[in-house]
Image: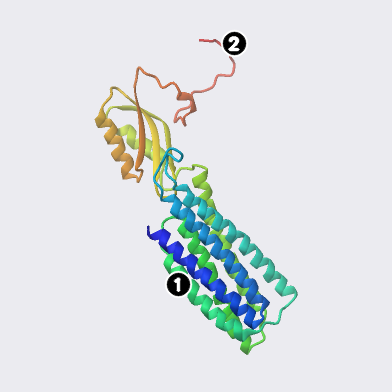
Amino acid sequence: MKTEKNIFIAFLLNLLFSIVEIIGGIFTGSIAIISDAVHDFGDATSIGLSYLFEKKSKKKPDELYTYGYARYSVLGGLITVVILLIGSGIVIYNAIDRFINPVSIHYNNMLILAVIGLIVNLLATYFTHGGHSINQKAVNLHMLEDVLGWAVILIGAVIMRFTNLWILDPILSICVALFILFNAIKSLKEILDIFLIKTPKDIKIQTLKEHILKIDGILDVHHFHVWTIDGERVCASLHIAVKEYSSQIKSDVKAELNEHGIDHITIEMETSNEECSEKECCVKSHPRPHTHHHHHHHHH
């Protein structure tokens, strides 16, 4: 359960750091640092939630969640991404405010904290990178945001000690916020696709249909649904019309779908004389032409 452990490490690092920051803020009397500590505490909370959801998502299917709990992980990702979106918005808003009312900043203490902040978040980013789960990717993006944020403070602080370019701070902040915003929106789209049961992007239904129709003894494929539970596990359900029942056909279809990374497959088999009762609701390759000029409906 690597993902879970990594998210937990990120959570601990963030929590410890926000506590260090609060203490540092009280000692240096810097409102900036205290407000930042609050921000980091929020981060820690959001990652704590992600951790709980990731843990829950590993539970096996039961009668309440027959597909298992995998989507809790996606939900964790959703919460993190929404928090990131709001966060980027606030950063951009504050930076624009900075342009209008420049702030004088006390740099020495900020430098020390920024270095610690950078190290802590680099560690957290390192632990959460390379995950496959959408939740872990979201948490990693979150950590990256913190790293970039501290890097900006650090670079800004160093440059501003020697020059008077206060404008650099808000400019860099806006760049970071836009970068995060862009990636968070990308993640959000991925998450919504999962909840909206969209066909996973590397799967072409039409191609799959053609491959299946090539299998010996298959007359037709309909009610073909492909979806993903958590962005990793892909399920399919389909009806196939055959000349006669055969378990060979079934295993051929399964092998074909497995090749395309679909591992959870439900197949309904019908012989040609057992016309599918629900032909209407499927995505048909050949829709029947509608005839509009009939005024009388014949009831069968």
Q: In the depicted view, which residue is nearer to us: 201 or 154? A: 154
* Crowd around label 1: few <14 · some 14–19 · many ≥20 (10 Å): some
* Of callouts 2 and 1, the N-terminal one: 1
Compute the Cα span from label 2 to label 1: 74 Å
Q: Secondary structure at mark 2?
A: loop
The answer to whether residue 51 is seen in the rendering is yes
Quadrant housing residue 65: top left
Which amino acid lies under the numbered mark 1 shown in the image of this protein?
A: Leu
Viewport quadrant of the N terminus: bottom left
Q: Residue at x 39, y 19 (%)?
A: 275
* In the displayed structure image, the side of residue 287 where residue 212 appears, left or right: left
| Residue 296, disc | 2
* Crowd around label 2: few <14 · some 14–19 · many ≥20 (10 Å): few
Residue corresponding to mark 1: 123
Question: Whole-percent x and y of residue 103?
Answer: 71, 79
The answer to whether residue 131 is seen in the rendering is no
Q: Is residue 17 above or below residue 278?
A: below
Q: Secondary structure at mark 1?
A: helix
Question: Whole-percent x and y of residue 122?
Answer: 47, 73
Which amino acid lies under the numbered mark 2 shown in the image of this protein?
A: His
Total of numbered circles in the picture?
Answer: 2
Q: Residue at x 55, y 55 (%)?
A: 79
* In the displayed structure image, the side of residue 76 where residue 4 appears, left or right: left
* In the displayed structure image, the side of residue 13 where residue 108 appears, left or right: right
Question: Whole-percent x and y of residue 238?
Answer: 39, 32
Q: Nearer the viewer, mark 2 or mark 1?
A: 1
| Residue 172, disc | none
Q: Is residue 191 above or below residue 100?
A: above
